[in-house]
Image (cartoon, rainbow, N blue to C red):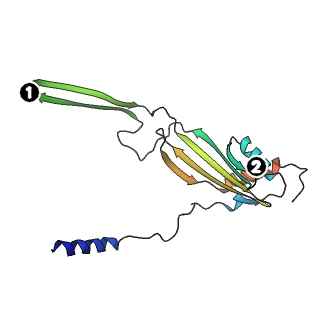
């Protein structure tokens, strides 16, 4: 009988330790102000597609009625490994295991080589995937970009928002240089 009040007291104490987040999750860092800029010619959607494909992006999906473009590109990451996953010298050498045993019938010695992996994996190259989404409306373009890194197992290791000034300003410059001169303003 005494264990029930003690258990109940412990349960109430632990329930009081639960914390509710002070705000909802947000993209961090916040997109740069240069990722939202005016576009005043009628072929803004086509020009944006042209700039992205020129930079090596592949179009994933487009919706012209909404003015939405989604594109991505990936590049191999040679020599990439997760520095925090250091179990068994991850990606740096050879693993040996073995043992010695004495039994009823005599004794024995054995060893084996496990996981020879000089930076190798299971036949997959670590990659970085860069995704860009553009929303083109009547007067503005909004850019959203993120980068994800996958290890040789195909597991997501890093992911972050990359809507920074550098990328958005380069896009804006290429966009204005590629824009048709004959396009009339809206």
Q: Quadrant of the N terminus?
A: bottom left
Residue 55 is situated, as x and y percent measured from the top left of the image, at 71, 42
Q: Tell me, for residue 73, which label it has, or none.
A: none
Question: Residue placed at 48% from the left, 38% from the top?
Answer: 152
Q: Quadrant of the C terminus?
A: bottom right
Q: Which residue is mark 1?
A: 104
Residue 154 is situated, as x and y percent measured from the top left of the image, at 49, 41
Determine the secondary structure under disc 2.
Answer: helix
Q: Which residue is mark 2?
A: 48
Asked if 140 appears above or below 87 in the picture, the reply is below
> Seen in the image, is 29 located left or right of residue 168?
left
Question: Residue placed at 23% from the left, 71% from the top?
Answer: 7
Looking at the rendered structure, the number of numbered marks drawn on it comes to 2
Residue 108 is situated, as x and y percent measured from the top left of the image, at 16, 25
Residue lying at the far left in this picture: please name it.
104
Asked if 149 appears above or below 26 in the picture, the reply is above
Asked if 12 appears above or below 36 in the picture, the reply is below
Circle 1 packing at 10 Å, graded few (<14), some (14-19), many (20+), is: few
> Seen in the image, is 44 located left or right of residue 100?
right
Question: Residue placed at 49% from the left, 71% from the top?
Answer: 22
> Seen in the image, is 184 located left or right of residue 145?
right
Q: Quadrant of residue 121?
A: top left
């Amino acid at each position: 009988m005494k264990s029930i009040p003690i258990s109940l007291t412990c349960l109430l104490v632990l329930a009081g330790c639960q914390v509710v987040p002070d705000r909802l999750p947000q993209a961090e860092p916040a997109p740069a102000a240069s990722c939202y800029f005016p576009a005043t010619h009628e072929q803004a959607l086509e020009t944006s597609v042209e700039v992205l494909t020129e930079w090596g992006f592949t179009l994933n999906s487009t919706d012209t009625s909404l003015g939405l473009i989604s594109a991505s590109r990936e590049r191999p990451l040679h020599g990439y490994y997760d520095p925090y996953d250091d179990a068994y010298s991850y990606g740096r050498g050879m693993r040996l295991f073995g043992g010695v045993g004495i039994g009823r019938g005599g004794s024995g010695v054995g060893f084996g080589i496990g996981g020879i992996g000089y930076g190798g994996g299971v036949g997959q190259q670590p990659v970085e995937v860069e995704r860009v989404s553009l929303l083109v409306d009547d007067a503005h373009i909004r850019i959203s970009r993120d980068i994800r890194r996958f290890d040789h197992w195909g597991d997501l290791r890093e992911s972050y928002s990359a809507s920074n000034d550098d990328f958005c300003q380069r896009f804006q410059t290429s966009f204005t240089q590629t824009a048709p001169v004959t396009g009339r303003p809206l």
